[in-house]
Amino acid sequence: MRKTLVIAWREYRAMVGTRAFLIGMAVMPLLMLGTLCVPAVLSGLQQPAVRRIAVIDQTGVLLQPLQQAAEQRNQQLSEGQPELSQSGHHDMLAVLGMQDRHLYEFEELPADDFDDSDRLLLSERIRSGTLHAFLEIPGSVLRSAGPVAGTDGAAESLMWVSEDAALSDTRRWCEQLVDGLLLQHRLADSLPPALLPAVISQLSAPTGIGPVGLYYRDENGRIQRGTRQTSLTALALPIGVMAMMFMAILLSVQPMLESVLEEKTLRISEVLLGSVSATQLMTGKLVGNAAGAMTIFGLYASAAAVAVWMQGAADSIPWSLLPWLLMFQLLAVLLFSSVFMSVAACVSQMREAQCLLMPVWLVLTLPLLLWFTVIREPNGTLATVASFLPPATPLLMAVRMCSGAVIPLWQSVLSLLLLLAGTGFGIMTASRLYRAGILRQGQAPGFSELLLLAWRGEAGG
Amino acid sequence: MAVVLENAEKRFGQRTAVAGISLSIPAGSLCGFIGPNGSGKTTTLRMILRIVRPDRGKVVVLGADSGECADHRVGYLPEERGLYRRMKVRELLRYYAALKDVRNPDPEITRWLRRLQADGWDQRRIDGLSKGMCQKIQFIAAVIARPRLLILDEPFSGLDPVNLELLRGAIEELQQQGTTIILSTHEMETAQRMCERVVMIYRGRKVLDGPVQQILAQSGSGELRVRTVGGRPLPTLPPAVAAVRQQGQYLQLLPSGSLTAAEVLRQLTAVVDLEHFEIVRPSLHEIFLRLVGDDTAALPAPVIAESGGRQGIRQGTLIAAAWQSVRSVFKPLINTGN
């Protein structure tokens, strides 16, 4: 035991006591933030272009309010305010800085005798870049809901024509606005003019549904209301925790890889194995590496906690999740470190190790591909099933738990048990590979040979 | 005995690395392990270190035949390297000492640094040291726990003559203090000069084992080397000489039958004046080449030169091998009627 701790302590010091480690600690969050913020930053750097939209308004009453709304929106964006959704809340894309930042400008076109030759001309303007889209509003929409019977050459319903018609943010913005305007006009037909402003004001006032966490009973038995949530905290917490855990794994597996390769290629492992058993050596290295990873996680978490506290949002952090997160983090580091360790023991060059580790990297980054779906539906089928797969469990369970959704206790316990079993199996297999590979010289084994080595656990000559 | 191997065998998949080696190394001796690359030396050393376990047979080290790894009584210096590049000298030596259960290793570290003229290197990083300096640090790491068995794999590689003598002196000093030393080397001269006994391993088998002097004596081919006064040729070939070969200023003679050197000398001096006469003894290097140089499929049978050994003396085999070698050299001369 004492020798194991001696190895662990050296491993820990070798990991956290280097300049490269400190630089990595500082740079990694910047890289992660950069990855998350690149769309927002690029979007911010892009000069908002003016999107000109031609409107063929056969109703004669919708264009002016559209122009006013566009001017108001342009004003808000020019002042740097994020766009509000209809309910008055910032939506998720806005929070991530990914909303449409272009300015809108409406151009009125005569509605009389507007036919396909005019539509072709406008389409040519769109192709040449002088126009973004054109919107055609038939006159009958003021009284009819849904598609209307068209006359010769007239649009059958509201029609949006642009290159990105299906996915256009501008189309969605116009659609919401026109729907509201049409509601007002249809009401105006059935209400006395004196009542109209008050009714419209009441009907169109945003409800402002406040996002509040679940009610709970406090230690005195009193019923308490859950913490008020915002899109910002609902996103920042799970993403932040996932990023911290991912960085801790990333910053610990690479030193492990380099350390084992150094010991193997410089024949240090032979000297060590002359003093300690392979099990002691591997355990010591894993313990030291895990301690280093937990130090990284602790430092990042402490920095984040201070930042949250300074923002006065400490109450919005579910501190009760901390033990779960620590367990997931520890098991994740042990699992991935043991895999990296065993691969490094079986090869002689970093290039060979990177080649064999390609599938492991894919598994490691899987949660990063799924987080957006998981965060929107933390209890969805994909999120639930994926969080039961041991390599993805730590990060995805952290995202699910921190999203504010209620995760059934059995799911948390089951995922932890599966991860525990997966980590145990991983360490056991890694131990066989490590013992088999650490003294092996020459060509790197292929996948099939790795499996054989793991099965036989035989030392190399 | 410090080390006893009984029919130790190790296979890696289909390949047999060590094929049933038996040997005994007396306590306090300095034993050389010699053999070409890939012969099974390293695997044998690893079995002694308990880094690998034999598939069959028994390995007893300092009286213990089990254990997951070598204990603090065994020190090991691997061939080249074996040091963490980014650690400082004293920090590294402390680490290796801690793994050997040495408490307070600083006085011993200081003593050895001074002994090997490495004072003041304490705070230097390994990657800033020359190869020879690293070799010294490795040596200190191997002996820091005052081992009773010391295994040295090519300890002199990378050393200049001065440091080589320094390390050689340290090794001999350790042996005088009772440490059993196994010296694995390719340098036959070093083995011949330093070791009391040698074990030669070839293709996973032991082909030679015994005290160096005894091996050298028994490996003699019976050849004689003479120089006549004025370098004159032999006027006639005496009956005692079966074949003669010019070798520079010397004549190499192969005696006929089992005649003694004294008889050959008597017959020679009867026909010519001699100014030099010697019985040719092959070096360890030549014996090595004789035994493994001709890389035929058939393995040579083990040659044991230790009287009273478990497998007894097989001088006949050794002499037969030597005779075959000499015959191949003199065959052309014999066939021409000499």
Image: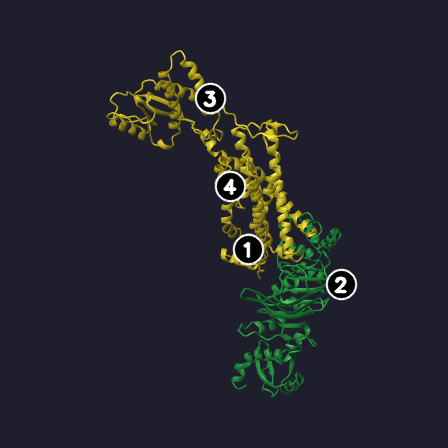
Chain colours: A yellow, B green
Q: Nearer the viewer, mark 4 or mark 2?
A: 4
Q: Chain of mark 1?
A: A
Q: Residues within 10 Å of mark 1 (few under 14, many from 20)?
A: many
Dot 1 or dot 3: first in sequence order is 3
Query: Which percent across, then down, holds residue A117?
Result: 24, 27
Label 4 environment density (alpha carbons within 10 Å; few <14, some 14–19, many ≥20): many
Gap between marks 1 and 3, in whole Å?
63 Å
Q: Secondary structure at mark 4?
A: helix
- The three-letter amino acid code for the residue at tag 2 is Gln
Residue behind mark 1: A346
Q: Which residue is mark 2?
A: B177
The tag on residue A384 is 4
Please tell me which residue is depicted at 54% across the width and 79% down the height of the picture: B328
Q: Position of residue B284 (x, y in %)?
A: 63, 71
Q: Residue at x 58, y 79 (%)?
A: B326
Residue denoted by label 3: A206
Looking at this view, is B125 or B83 the one in front? B83
